[in-house]
Image (cartoon, coloured by chain):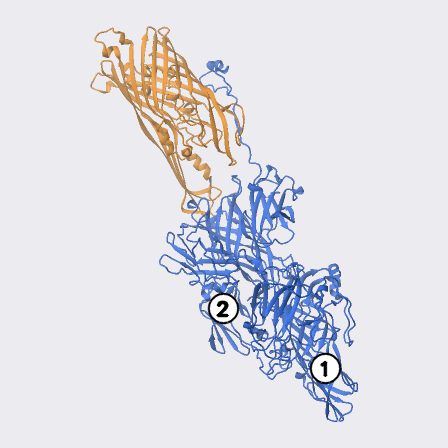
């Protein structure tokens, strides 16, 4: 201390006037040190769970980054354990150089904890330091795929309750949300039984219950009574999709009792989500613009959202630290229509119409202190959990895109700027597109409170009644098959409580109880056992309302299932096996990626390449008949094993087997290991001539017939019986990496051969009487004869006309993988087959076609010989025709020429080549158009031609075994109101088959059969968008 | 759209919290910290118990009875502190340039009057009435207070002083024994406001009520001329011995602000309450005992003043500004010794010294960061009596006083949060000095 006992100033002051202000001293100025740099916001938040694997990482600082252009991973990096994760690091434009964005090069792994490390990150105010050097977050579990990606624990347990009633209090207006370690079996969610919220009088509280994936929401219809006691119970009858019973959810109890705190008096804060086009200060992306990024849609599809949001705040003085808020059910944001382009390039032929995001439960949120900084400049944190339904104005788009997205977690920042509360928040919306692919979009949400709340707009009242916008099957009942649900798509979300008991079903006027009625988005999915030939009425009764209470007029949706002719029962076929080719095979050489050829085929046939299975995909098998579910048992009749190159079993593969009426899916518990060999086996009865089927030992149809695993034969005598089985169908594949292509299955529907027996049965429809059945038909004509054939006719004797008998009808399914748009250069680089001219010029969307086998019905050929009546020909039944679509290459190391030479040989497969066919979607005159070249084999294993010489029957041999054909096919890609995709492929050139019949080298007959241009129509239809 | 009145809410609340501008002010008042009139200042209050001037109304109203002449006094007062803080560093310690943290002056205009009111009675027994007032900023500031937290530290004493208002009476009751009583008036300010505001602070539907309520604090005094009381004859050696004892009740200035704001869209009725209740000035309970003796032209006096500061602890527990600091105070006794020399009939010289221990026990008071020191006080002054002044019919007395306070260095630890809301700790040494000047004009009638 400067000791100034007697300052010299004293004398002067003594002499001064009494009123003189003192001379003043060395006045002290006090300047406190600044804070240096701070982190103000991160996305994800520290220790946030359930973060999308597509999430960007955003770190917003208090001050600009010191050198934005020099940012690299020596300053900030993303780590998985001790391994750096490749990311693109940039500073968000429009963020005043304060927001750093890390975009992972590849999607993050599900259910994994990542750490963002700040190593040497400097702001203009100094180095940025966080406790522990960074922050961590955990990604969400996968919604589909292998079990290990969908579960965080072998036990089915509640992993989170929001609010937790500890740090975040439960209020009288709160909605309860639960998250689980495994996806919940929604069928086990029965409110009032397995799930309850009861008041202190033990009365069930009316509530809206939403369940999907790992999420469960319980939203009381009316606000709870503050101060009263409530008990929520999650019983052990709640089960996961993997069959696990729920563990005690609340610290050793299945119940949790709480007393909600009072929210009131509440105040509604009116905010607007502007469509300003300005960049978000968090990401630099336009605010409130929702991109929808998917292989099917490309990366340019986006919707600009706007509208008012009304946040009801609890009485702030009572909750100064964590201020609860709610956004009421029924609130909505509207957005511009999505311009739908397949692969982002090819107009789909429809746009979405207005995109509406509607809150289907009360959103619950909190205004919280800034988690990183105590700076007075630091904004508060906003966290909101919401459940929304995404709907679109256009019927097709609505069916394709509408869905519920539960537990959407907004993490944002809020601060008052210029007297207005502004909030910027991020979340990642993951939505299903066409039920085929999960799209994602990072939503940079911005909300601004109205400055004058007294003049702010009031919540808009919805006075419009809901209506049924589309439904399935509707006009496509002929394409409907057992196992498919009935899906009703409303124009807006309907109140789930109003659905209870207000949807009834009649089968042939008799009431039946659906197996399940569930809701997703604006869709109501009714699952029930459908029977061929039955009439169904779906009755929507009075009482169904939208979320605002507007009633739906009562109405009935009726359809008739196609008739199934019971004569000539046929064994079920595997129409499509993914991965692999649907036949039992012989002559395999796994060490050389060769899985042999179909049993019964010509020995010189192409060898099928070993398919590579992306790590996260499921085995899928489609059948031609309704199957006996009891006969399809994992580990018994359906085996999945890891094998070595000698086909010796290494280990069984555990997984989840889903058995549906006409298909099965097997999803492994663990992703397929890259490079490992696997085999899945569909057991049959071991005898292609026997119809016996023991459900305990073989896969059988609901009619009790065995799986037919061999369709081909080298002679009529060895032709498999129509109702026969065969050896086990063993399909091999190798594990591969995840890829981004979209797997899709398209069924050849409708078809007149409803019973899929390859026969024309009495009562079956035909294309002449009903042109709808031109789809999946082919008209067979005789264009030339030779040898001892003088004349020939199809369907009826020579000279007669019987157009309805000249058609064959297809049974089958096509699988494909939509890779995405390739421009002309990329297409030329990727393609292994000649490019269509349009693609070579303009590019197109590459679709890999999975080779498979189609079956057609038989036809009867009549012929007159050149030596009548000495030699006559019996009417020749072709039997079912098997059309195998060939791979693009032969898996043999040394392909041999076909013998007999009825087809062209293929080139040898390159190492790792899939051999898939190549199809292209291009922009056509009337919308998207599909182009492909089909290179195939035709087999007529049961063709029986008999010539009579002087009345003595003589069986003729024929050449319709592995008979090669090539056809360019094309057709429009259409989207149906119910959201399904349909492609009607027709042959661009005639398909000609020169049928040669002979016996002992003496009799020789040639008939040229032609399927005229445009008269082979393969109409393929995707499955229900929702199940 | 209805326009809000453009009155920022913060400004409104600020205006309610104080009448006049805010200046630094401590827990002191002119009378106890310095002295009221120049003669009190000159003797460092050591002779104030036996001061014939009107300031006796406060220091010893019984002494009013000793001089039945009427007086009208006016004066000016200027105290200039130079309160210094030296930093020794710490966590997030500020940069201090310069030495003087606080030099807020106290500048008062003084007015007082005393008069024998016996003419109002049927008796001929003198009853002296006195009135004394001091108004800050030379009369422009009636009510000055500041109460708040201070990261940089704040001195417990000095700065602007609240209105000083004191009136009382004294009379002789028996041989050499006088009694007196007075009241000191302090103000309690209460302000309430209700308004509706948006988040920008624009208000409408405002309602403001401000009330300043006077609070009376008693002062009781008795003095005795030992000779007149105890001696049976005169002259007696004890005739020149006077003793006195005075009790002063504690006084506090209290300010309560209660604001309520409804913010549509955010906080509905009953709104957000902002309640501040703070002690804006405090004078402890004081018992002063003293004696003087006349040695020829010298008059020597000594007093001991007991100040009960411990009561402030409880008061501050109810202070919404300072309740977090766990402030602790001790009772103190201040010794004062003074001497007066009668140079001639007209001129009198006075001096006095005192030592005042700091009542503040804390070396750390979180966020409030009070600083206080033990101090030595030296007073000097003179009085010139003009028995026959020009123009005026009555004698005039001119007084001048000077006082010097030396603050003994004391170490403190300052803690709190910086303006950027970071934890803050700083070791400092506080010290400094104060110069006080005062002059008065007294008309004796």
User: Which mark sits nearer the N-terminus, 2 or 1?
Assistant: 2
Is residue A856 at least partly visible in the picture? Answer: yes
Left or right side of A975 for B35: left
Residue A124: which quarter of the image?
Answer: top right
Q: Position of residue A18 (x, y in %)?
A: 44, 17
Q: Position of residue A746 (x, y in %)?
A: 63, 69
On-image quarter of the C terminus of chain A: bottom right
Which residue is nearer to you in this view: A703 or A45? A703
Residue A793: which quarter of the image?
Answer: bottom right
- At 74% from the left edge and 83% from the top edge, which residue is drawn? A957
The chain coloured orange carries which letter? B
Q: Position of residue A383 (x, y in %)?
A: 51, 50
**Residue at the spot of label 1:** A781
Which residue is nearer to you in this view: A546 or A563? A563
| Disc 1: CA contacts within 10 A as few (<14), some (14-19) or many (>=20) | many
The chain coloured blue carries which letter? A
State which mark lies toward you, 2 or 1: 2
Residue B13 against residue A928 in the figure, above or below: above
* Number of dots carrying numbers: 2
| Residue B260: assigned label | none
**Residue at the spot of label 2:** A516
Left or right side of A496 for A74: right
Chain bearing mark 2: A
Q: Secondary structure at mark 2?
A: strand
Q: Are marks 2 and 1 on the same chain?
A: yes
Residue B326 against residue A601 in the figure, above or below: above
Which residue is nearer to you in this view: A954 or A835? A954
Q: Position of residue B323 (x, y in %)?
A: 40, 34
């Amino acid at each position: 201390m400067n000791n100034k006992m007697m300052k010299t100033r004293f004398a002067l002051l003594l002499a001064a006037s009494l009123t003189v202000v003192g001379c003043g001293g060395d006045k002290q100025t006090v300047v406190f040190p600044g804070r240096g740099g701070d982190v103000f916001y991160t996305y994800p938040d520290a220790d946030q769970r359930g973060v999308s694997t597509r999430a960007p990482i955003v770190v917003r600082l208090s001050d600009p980054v010191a050198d934005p252009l020099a940012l690299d991973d020596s300053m900030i990096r993303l780590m998985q354990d001790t391994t750096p994760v490749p990311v693109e690091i940039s500073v968000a434009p429009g963020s005043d150089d304060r927001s750093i964005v890390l975009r992972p090069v590849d999607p993050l792994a599900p259910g994994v904890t990542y750490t963002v490390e700040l190593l040497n990150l400097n702001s203009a105010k100094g180095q940025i330091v966080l406790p522990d050097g960074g922050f961590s977050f955990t990604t969400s579990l996968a919604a589909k795929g292998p079990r290990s990606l969908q579960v965080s624990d072998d036990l089915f347990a509640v992993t989170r309750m929001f609010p937790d009633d500890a740090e975040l209090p439960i209020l009288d207006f709160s909605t309860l949300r639960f998250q689980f370690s495994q996806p919940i079996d929604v069928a086990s969610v029965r409110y009032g039984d397995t799930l309850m919220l009861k008041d202190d009088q033990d009365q069930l509280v009316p509530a809206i219950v939403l369940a999907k994936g790992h999420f469960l929401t319980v939203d009381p219809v009316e606000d709870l009574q503050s101060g009263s006691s409530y008990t929520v119970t999650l019983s052990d009858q709640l089960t996961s999709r993997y069959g696990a019973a729920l563990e005690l959810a609340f610290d050793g109890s299945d119940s949790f009792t709480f007393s909600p705190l009072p929210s009131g008096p509440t105040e509604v804060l009116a905010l607007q989500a502007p469509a300003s086009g300005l960049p978000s200060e968090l990401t630099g992306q336009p605010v409130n613009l929702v991109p929808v990024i998917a292989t099917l849609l490309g990366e340019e599809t986006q919707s600009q959202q706007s509208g008012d949001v009304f946040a009801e705040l609890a009485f702030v003085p009572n909750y100064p630290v964590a201020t609860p808020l709610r956004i009421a059910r029924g609130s909505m944001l509207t957005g511009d229509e999505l311009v739908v382009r397949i692969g982002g390039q090819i107009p789909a032929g429809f746009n979405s119409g207005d995109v509406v995001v509607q809150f289907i439960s009360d959103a619950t949120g909190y205004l919280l202190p800034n988690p990183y900084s105590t700076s007075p400049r630091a904004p508060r944190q906003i966290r909101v959990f919401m459940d929304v339904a995404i709907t679109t104005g256009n019927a097709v788009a609505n069916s394709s895109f509408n869905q519920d997205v539960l537990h959407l977690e907004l993490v944002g920042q809020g601060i008052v700027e210029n007297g207005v509360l502004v909030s910027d928040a991020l979340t990642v919306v993951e939505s299903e597109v066409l039920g085929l692919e999960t799209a994602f979009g990072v939503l940079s949400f911005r909300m601004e409170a109205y400055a004058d709340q007294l003049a702010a707009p009031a919540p808009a009242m919805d006075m419009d009644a809901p209506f049924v916008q589309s439904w399935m099957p509707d006009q496509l009942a002929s394409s409907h098959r057992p196992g498919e649900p009935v899906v009703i798509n409303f124009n807006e979300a309907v109140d789930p409580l109003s659905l209870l008991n207000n949807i009834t079903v009649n089968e042939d006027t008799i009431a039946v109880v659906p197996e399940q009625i569930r809701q997703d988005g604006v869709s109501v999915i009714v699952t029930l056992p459908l029977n061929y030939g039955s009439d169904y009425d779906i009755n929507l009764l009075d009482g169904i309302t939208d979320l605002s209470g507007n009633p739906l007029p009562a109405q009935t949706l009726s359809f008739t299932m196609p008739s199934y002719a019971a004569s000539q029962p046929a064994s079920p076929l595997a129409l499509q096996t993914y991965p692999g080719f649907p036949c039992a095979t012989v002559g395999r050489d796994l060490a050389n990626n060769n899985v042999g050829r179909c049993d019964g085929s010509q020995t010189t046939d192409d060898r099928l390449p070993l398919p590579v299975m992306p790590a996260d995909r499921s085995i899928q098998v489609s059948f031609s008949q309704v199957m006996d579910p009891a006969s399809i048992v994992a580990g018994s009749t359906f085996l999945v094993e890891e094998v070595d190159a000698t086909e010796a079993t290494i280990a069984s593969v555990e997984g989840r087997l889903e058995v549906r009426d006409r298909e099965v899916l097997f999803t492994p518990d663990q992703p397929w290991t890259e490079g490992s060999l696997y085999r899945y086996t569909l057991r049959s009865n071991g005898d292609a001539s026997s119809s016996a089927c023991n459900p305990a030992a073989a896969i059988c149809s609901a009619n009790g017939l065995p799986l037919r695993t061999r369709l081909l034969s080298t002679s009529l005598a060895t032709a498999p019986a129509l109702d026969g089985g065969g050896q086990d169908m063993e399909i091999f594949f190798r594990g591969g990496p995840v890829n981004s292509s979209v797997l899709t299955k398209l069924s050849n529907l409708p078809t007149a051969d409803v019973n899929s027996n390859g026969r024309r049965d009495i009562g079956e429809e035909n294309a002449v009487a009903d042109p709808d059945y031109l789809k999946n038909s082919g008209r067979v004509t005789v264009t030339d004869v030779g040898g001892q054939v003088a004349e020939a006719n199809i369907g009826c004797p020579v000279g007669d006309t019987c157009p309805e008998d000249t058609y064959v009808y297809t049974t089958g399914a096509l699988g494909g993988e939509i890779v995405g748009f390739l421009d002309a250069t990329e297409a030329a680089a990727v393609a292994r087959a000649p490019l269509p001219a349009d693609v070579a010029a303009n590019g197109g969307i590459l679709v890999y076609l999975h080779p498979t086998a189609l079956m057609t019905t038989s036809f009867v050929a009549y012929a007159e010989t050149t030596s009548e009546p000495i030699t006559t020909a019996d009417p020749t039944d072709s039997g079912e025709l098997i059309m195998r679509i060939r791979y693009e290459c032969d898996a043999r190391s040394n392909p041999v020429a076909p013998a007999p030479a009825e087809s062209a040989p293929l080139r040898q497969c390159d190492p790792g080549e899939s051999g898939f066919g190549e199809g292209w979607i291009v922009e056509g005159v009337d919308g998207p158009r599909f182009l492909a070249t089909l290179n195939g084999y035709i087999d007529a294993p049961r063709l029986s031609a008999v010539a009579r010489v002087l009345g003595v029957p003589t069986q003729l041999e024929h050449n319709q075994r592995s008979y090669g054909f090539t056809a360019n096919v094309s057709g429009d890609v259409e989207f149906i109101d119910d959201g399904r995709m349909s492609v009607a492929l027709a042959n661009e050139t005639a398909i000609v088959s020169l049928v040669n019949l002979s016996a002992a080298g003496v009799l020789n007959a040639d008939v040229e059969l032609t399927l005229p241009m445009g008269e082979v129509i393969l109409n393929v239809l995707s499955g229900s968008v929702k199940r | 759209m209805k326009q809000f009145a453009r009155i920022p809410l913060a400004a409104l609340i600020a205006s309610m919290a104080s009448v006049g501008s805010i200046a630094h002010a401590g827990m002191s008042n002119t009378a106890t910290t310095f002295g009221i009139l120049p003669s009190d200042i000159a003797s460092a209050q050591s002779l104030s118990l036996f001061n014939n001037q009107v300031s006796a109304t406060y220091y010893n109203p019984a002494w009013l009875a000793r001089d039945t002449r009427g007086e009208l006094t006016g004066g000016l007062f200027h105290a200039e502190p130079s309160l210094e803080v030296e930093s020794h560093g710490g966590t997030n310690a500020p940069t201090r340039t310069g030495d003087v943290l606080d030099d807020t002056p106290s500048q008062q205009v003084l007015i007082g009057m005393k008069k024998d009111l016996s003419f109002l009675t049927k008796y001929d027994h003198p009853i002296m009435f006195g009135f004394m007032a001091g108004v800050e900023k030379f009369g422009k500031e009636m009510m000055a207070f500041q109460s708040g937290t201070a990261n940089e530290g704040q001195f417990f004493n000095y700065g602007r002083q609240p209105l000083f208002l004191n009136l009382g009476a004294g009379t002789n009751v028996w041989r050499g024994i006088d009694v007196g009583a007075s009241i000191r008036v302090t103000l309690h300010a209460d302000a309430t406001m209700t308004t509706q505001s948006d988040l920008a602070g624009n208000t409408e539907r405002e309602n403001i009520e401000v009330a300043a309520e006077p609070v009376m604090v008693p002062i009781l005094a008795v003095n005795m001329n030992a000779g007149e009381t105890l001696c049976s004859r005169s002259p007696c050696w004890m005739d020149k011995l006077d003793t006195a004892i005075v009790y002063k009740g504690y006084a506090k200035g209290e300010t309560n602000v209660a604001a309520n704001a409804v913010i549509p869209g955010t906080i509905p009725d009953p709104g957000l309450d902002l309640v501040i209740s703070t002690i804006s000035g405090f004078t402890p309970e004081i018992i002063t005992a003293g004696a003087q003796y006349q040695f020829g032209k010298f008059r020597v006096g000594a007093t001991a003043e007991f100040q009960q500061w411990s009561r402030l602890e409880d008061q501050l527990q109810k202070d919404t500004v300072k309740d977090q600091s766990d402030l602790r105070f001790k009772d103190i006794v201040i010794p004062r010794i003074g001497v007066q020399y009668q140079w001639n009939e007209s001129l009198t010289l006075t001096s006095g010294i005192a030592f005042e221990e700091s009542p503040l026990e804390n070396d750390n008071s979180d966020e409030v960061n009070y600083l206080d020191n033990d101090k030595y006080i030296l007073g000097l002054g003179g009085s010139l009596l003009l028995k026959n002044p020009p123009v005026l019919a009555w004698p005039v007395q001119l007084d001048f006083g000077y006082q010097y306070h030396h603050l003994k260095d004391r170490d403190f630890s300052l803690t709190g949060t910086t303006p950027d809301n970071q934890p803050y700790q700083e070791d400092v040494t506080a010290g400094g000095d104060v110069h006080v000047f005062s002059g008065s004009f007294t008309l004796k009638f």
